[in-house]
Image (cartoon, rainbow, N blue to C red):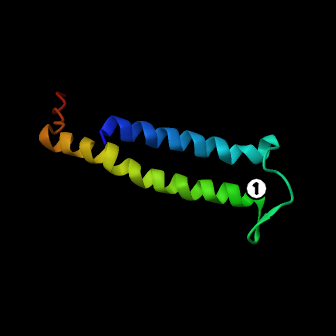
Amino acid sequence: MKTTTQKFLLWLTLGVCLGATWLPYLGFFNEAKMIGFLPQPLALTLGCNVILTLCVLALYPLYFKPFIARLKANPVVKEAANG
C-alpha cells in the first residue's frame, strides 16, 4: 500500500473516531443500555480512544521517521550572529 493511501486512511480513521466520541454529547448512543459492564456511551468513547491511541502510534513511522531521515541528510546549520 502506498504511503499516501496509508496517510489518507489514517486521517480518515482519526476523523471518524473523533466524530464518534462526540456522538453521546449530541444525543446518539445515549441510552441506558449496557455493553458488558459499561454503559453504552462510555463503551463507545473508550473503544474510540483505543483506536485513536493506535492511530497516534501509527503516525510516528509515517511522518516523523521520514522527517528525521531528511534532517540527517540535510542538517540545519545555525549561522553565527555578527555582533
Give the image location of residue 53, x and y in percent: 51, 56
- Quarter containing the N terminus: top left
Q: Is residue 12 left or right of residue 21?
A: left
Residue at 36% over, 50% down: 60
Q: Quadrant of residue 43?
A: bottom right
Residue farthest front in this picture: 1
Residue at 16% over, 33% down: 80
Q: Is residue 76 left or right of residue 63?
A: left
Residue farthest left in this picture: 73
**In this rendering, is residue 56 above or below 73?**
below
* In-front residue for pair 77/19: 19
Q: Amino acid at mark 1?
A: Pro
Residue farthest bottom in this picture: 37
Q: Is residue 2 left or right of residue 48?
A: left
**In this rendering, is residue 41 above or below 34?**
above
Residue at 71% over, 44% down: 22
Residue farthest right in this picture: 32
Give the image location of residue 47, x and y in percent: 62, 58
Give the image location of residue 24, x and y in percent: 77, 48
Q: Which residue is mark 1?
A: 41
Q: Is residue 23 left or right of residue 1?
A: right
